[in-house]
Amino acid sequence: EAGVAQSPRYKIIEKRQSVAFWCNPISGHATLYWYQQILGQGPKLLIQFQNNGVVDDSQLPKDRFSAERLKGVDSTLKIQPAKLEDSAVYLCASSSGLVFSYEQYFGPGTRLTVT
Amino acid sequence: AQTVTQSQPEMSVQEAETVTLSCTYDTSESDYYLFWYKQPPSRQMILVIRQEAYKQQNATENRFSVNFQKAAKSFSLKISDSQLGDAAMYFCIWGANTPLVFGKGTRLSVIA
């Protein structure tokens, strides 16, 4: 089966600019996650969707970050305006299960550099 | 709040040898899961092994096994017969609900 797809793979922007990332999960996976992975750290969950509803967005900086999952399939994550500290790899993952214990399948990530 | 500590930022192992990666965690929960995921260079993160806290038997997956010590809150990963393809960043992860709690990772190098 096809894996989790993400685009773009790399993005360089200046601070205060906007950027959007796209994720297409594995077909049939109801749960979709966006993580932020800063260099030298483990991934941090930004938002979790169950179909097209938000399950957890407690760690999403809502003043600048937004995400949507229209029709319960692919998803976009947006940053507006970007700050230097947003430089990180943004990972998308999906799982078939409704609870955290199910295996998560990760995409290749988008490496964002904010200058 | 739950925490996961991986005290070895980097480790190396000779090909065909055995290596153990350490992980400790802190939680007051009694029912939870523990995971090891690997993240090869420039490749997707994938699940290596999973352990349910209520199970006393240590999980094994081919060359990968864990030593789960619930009372000590320890969850180490043993890789036997190491292969070049095992070179990656390994994350120890704790979960009882979302969000999962990740350690900072251990970078494993395999020497031919």
Image (cartoon, helix red, strand yellow):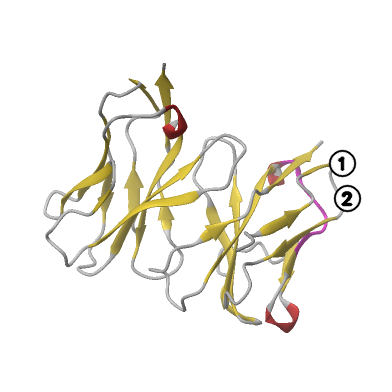
Question: In terms of secondary structure, where does tag 1 sit?
Answer: loop
- From the viewer's perspective, tell me whether residue A68 is left or right of residue A35: right
Tell me residue A112's x, y (percent): 74, 44
- Name the amino acid type tagged 2: Gln
In reply to whether residue A93 is colored magenta, the answer given is no
Please name the residue that numbered disc 2 is placed on: A17
**Numbered label attached to residue A79:** none
Name, please, the residue furthest toward the top.
B112
Confirm or deny contact between disc 1 and disc 2 (CB under 8 A).
Answer: yes
Please name the residue that numbered disc 1 is placed on: A14
Q: Is residue B75 visible?
A: no
Q: State the extent of the magenta-drawn residues as a range.
A: A77-84
Tell me the quadrant of the picture where the N terminus of chain A can be found: bottom right
- Along the line of sight, the residue nearer the viewer: B8 or B46: B46
**Across the whole image, how many numbered discs are drawn on residues?**
2
Tell me residue B63's x, y (percent): 28, 41
In reply to whether residue A82 is colored magenta, the answer given is yes
Q: Is residue B38 visible?
A: yes
- Name the amino acid type tagged 1: Glu
> Is residue A13 placed above or below A18 in the rendered structure?
above
Where on the picture, by quarter, is residue A106? bottom right
